[in-house]
Image (cartoon, rainbow, N blue to C red):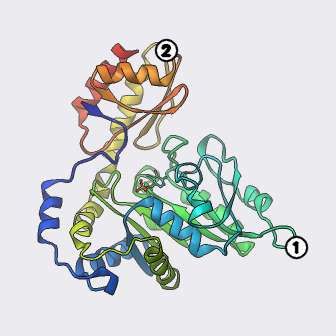
Amino acid sequence: MIDLRSDTVTKPSEEMREAARDAEVGDDVYGEDPTINELEARTAEVLGTEDALFVPSGTMGNQIAGRVHTERGEELLCERESHIYKWELAGLAQHAEVQPRTVDGGPRGAITPEQVREGYVEADGHRPGTGALAVENTHNSRGGIALSPEEIEAAAEAAHNLGVTVHLDGARLFNAAAAQDCSAAEFVEPVDTVMCCLSKGLGAPVGSMLAGSEELIEEAHRVRKLFGGGMRQAGMIAAPGLAALANRERLGEDHRRAGRLADGLASVDGLTVDDPDTNIVLVHTDRPAEAVLDNCEAEGVLGVPFAEHTIRFCTHWDIDDSDIERAIEGVERAV
Ligand SMILES: *Cc1c(COP(=O)(O)O)cnc(C)c1O
């Protein structure tokens, strides 16, 4: 089976398994797990922040951020198709305890400074006030679009000028950096917190990082405990994460393969394909996506339905060049 459903389906490498087995551990709730401490320090260094916090999932990292940036009942401004709003079980309502206000970032999911100013709500006797802005890079639902550091900075600056703090959902931040040919830190510099996943293209079995100032991460630490994310000898799962961080250099391979997949599928009758920025390929189908996917599965290729007539395929490190060629042939037969 060629599993292109997500870059989360990767299996940990031998190196990661050995790192887990050999990890030095302690009780992380007491701050005594040396492997976690190393992962947090290393992440802060890579992202250019004062501090970082290991969290079990990207979803938890995003919701912790929503919580630390806002007061209960405030608004959080985000993109209409953003993960934090659309794919986290209304966590903004239930965990961050905010009211989301969405703006339409268009086909690239880019929130403009004008949209930040228009969406901003000042607190008064009727209105709750805007507590935070959330931006996403790469933008998952928009097809793995990589925004530029300038686009992130422009939106963040508009928010900061209104006294609004900014969270960057960078589940695939290193993919964005590879696509934009810049360092991940360039995206992080203008924002207050960033979440990035170790468990996606980087290939770790578990875990995400939330990074920001010492003050915000100290508060995030408390909220992680509140959400049930305080873990004990979690160096066992952080050690593969450290190995995963080193994998960020190879993400360009996934992007190249996504490009080849898109090219191959574009010549199939009945499909139109968005030109991919990163490792996500959105394919629009004449027939219902679910029906096409059933046929794909019978041909040994897996993807996920993204809309009634849209399929998402995602490349990752368990997929090589020959898998891509076989996937193209399989999907062609399926269609
Ligand atoms: C996957 C993803 C998340 C959530 O990460 P999980 O570890 O699956 O909870 C958040 N934001 C974006 C953009 C994602 O793609």
Closer to the observer: label 2 or label 1? Answer: 1
Quarter of the image for the N terminus: give it: top left
Q: What residue sits right under mark 1 in the picture? A: 125
Work out how far the residue at label 2 is from the one at label 1, CA to CA, in angstroms.
Answer: 54 Å
Q: Residue at x 40, y 24 (%)?
A: 293
Q: Residue at x 49, y 14 (%)?
A: 270
Ligand 1 placement by image quarter? bottom left
Q: Is residue 156 visible?
A: yes
Q: Residue at x 54, y 69 (%)?
A: 65
The percent position of residue 287, horizontal first and vertical second, equals 51, 16
Figure quadrant of residue 148: bottom right
The percent position of residue 242, horizontal first and vertical second, equals 26, 67
* In-front residue for pair 29/260: 29
* In-front residue for pair 314/23: 23
Dot 2 amino acid type? Gly
Q: What residue sits right under mark 2 in the picture? A: 270
Q: Is residue 259 above or below residue 234?
A: above
Local packing at callout 1 (Cα closer than 10 Å; few below 14, some 14-19, many 20+) is few
Local packing at callout 2 (Cα closer than 10 Å; few below 14, some 14-19, many 20+) is few
